Image: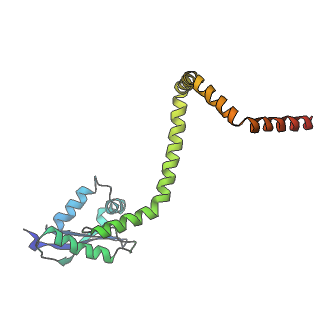
Amino acid sequence: MGYSEGKIYKLSCEDGHYYYGSTIAALRTRLHGHKLASKTQPYRVYTHINTIGWDKVTIELVENYPCSDKKELNKRESEYIANSRNDALCLNTILSHATPEQREEKRAEYFKTYVRVITEDRKEYQKKYTKEWREAHKEELRKKKQEDYLKNKEARDQKNRERYYQNKEDILRKLKEKRSMKKNED
């Protein structure tokens, strides 16, 4: 048995969903392989079929395709998948023989579709995780902040003095305005 026994098959569900595949094995053997894989693999095809039940799925030969190697067989399978790419009932999520351009196009399409969702999810997770972590390490953070305050007191005081002398006029003007506003309120 070799690639001269190549076949393109279709898993058809009673609800209209379908999946294209290729094999050199007998169709019943390939169907058995799918059933085994569906117990451990989280692919869309298996999720759907496990939901409706394997008793509502048939495997049918689409085309005998004798060829010389796996690459050639996958390329033929990809043609069927590409023709069904925009059909919502098609359970194939990737081309079995995608060119680098097709892979890049698929990646760009995915990124364009999900970038906002991914970014928002990441921000939400980070916000939640940070809040939980800070809550769990509250005492540790307080001690660290206090140590840093004492450790850098001299440098911070020096920096504040420099900033005061550089902006002395503005600071005094703002203080004067604040005092006059307070006086007017009373």
- In this view, the residue in front, 70 or 177, is 177
Classify 39 as above or below 19: above
Residue at 29%, 63% (x, y): give it: 54
At which x and y percent is residue 6? 14, 72
Residue at 52%, 47% (x, y): give it: 124
In the rendered view, does 150 fall on the left or right side of 85?
right
Residue at 48%, 49% (x, y): give it: 122
At which x and y percent is residue 42? 33, 55
* Image quadrant in which the C terminus is located: top right
Classify 20 as above or below 168: below
At which x and y percent is residue 21? 24, 69
Q: Is residue 122 visible?
A: yes
Q: Quadrant of residue 14?
A: bottom left
- In this view, the residue in front, 87 or 69, is 69
- In this view, the residue in front, 166 or 94, is 166
Residue at 27%, 76% (x, y): give it: 80
Q: Is residue 93 visible?
A: no
At which x and y percent is residue 120? 51, 53
Q: In which quarter of the image is residue 29?
A: bottom left
Q: In which quarter of the image is residue 1?
A: bottom left
In the rendered view, does 91 fall on the left or right side of 142?
left
Looking at the image, how many numbered discs can be counted on the residues? Answer: 0
In the rendered view, does 25 fall on the left or right side of 162?
left
Colour style of the rendered protein structure: rainbow
